[in-house]
Image (cartoon, helix red, strand yellow):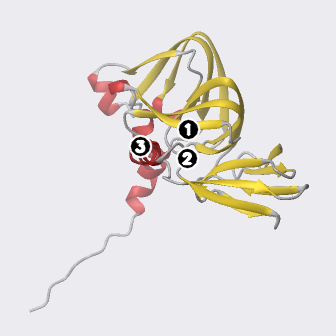
Amino acid sequence: MQYEIGHRPEFSMLAVHLNQGESVVAESGAMVAMTDRVDIKTSARGGVWKALKRAVVGGESIFQNTFTATADGQHVKFSPPTMGDLVQYDLQGSMLLLQSRAYVASAPEVTLDTRWEGFKGFFSGNGLFLLKVEGTGPVFFSTYGAVQPIQVDGSMVVDTGHIVAFEPSLQYRVRSVGGMKSLFFSGEGLVAEFSGQGRVWMQTRRPSRLAEFLHPYRRVESSSSSD
């Protein structure tokens, strides 16, 4: 399996090239185009219970699609649901932690699950769970905006809304930038203070800021009553 990422960083698209018998797994709805000698199998990978847990607490679809080439020289193209970049990370019997809805595609040997993070896990307002990907092979995840990898060697503070993924070798704690006044009035919200050695991937834009920007322009339906 070979792959490339084009149209970066605003409108990234993943192209996976497959020879006969090779497969790639993707999130439901991620496929953009494919050649005609590719079979699709839809399933709740890992079992129904694990798939339901991914959907309810991890923000992912219950079903995933497996694309398998029935001849050499085939390809499938995927894109994430939001504008932004795509990142490829090679797992080697290891694990990577993602924010909800970041997963796009992976090798069939990669499994996707959720991990309970307790009350420190409020990444981008997505709740108390992170997505856990582990196994062997490439995994592809998306960002909102461009992506900036950071090599942490000691400590680093990152706004929680900008965190996309991080390696499990890192420890972190969530705190406010300042005191209670800063939490509610500074516009900064919560940050994650990482410690140890490992990589963090952050996105240059925060989805919640887009929602705040668009809020004044929303269409408001007016109701009127007649006698």
Q: Is residue 42 left or right of residue 15?
A: left
From the image, tell me which residue sits under label 1. Answer: 112
Pointer 3 or 1: first along the chain: 3
The residues tagged by marks 3 and 2 sit, at their Cα atoms, a distance apart of 12 Å
Task: Kindly report the distance in space between the C-alpha atoms of the residues bearing marks 3 and 1.
Answer: 11 Å
Callout 2 amino acid: Arg
Instruction: Quadrant for residue 216, please give it.
Output: bottom left
Q: Position of residue 125 (x, y in %)?
A: 39, 39
Give the x, y percent position of residue 39: 74, 61
Q: Residues within 10 Å of mark 3 (few under 14, many from 20)?
A: some
Residue type pointed to by label 1:
Leu
Whether tag 3 and tag 2 are in contact, CB under 8 A, the answer is no
Q: Is residue 185 above or below residue 2?
A: above
> The residue tagged with tag 3: helix, strand or loop?
helix
Tag 1's secondary structure? Answer: strand
Residue marked by disc 2 = 45
Earlier residue among tags 3 and 2: 2
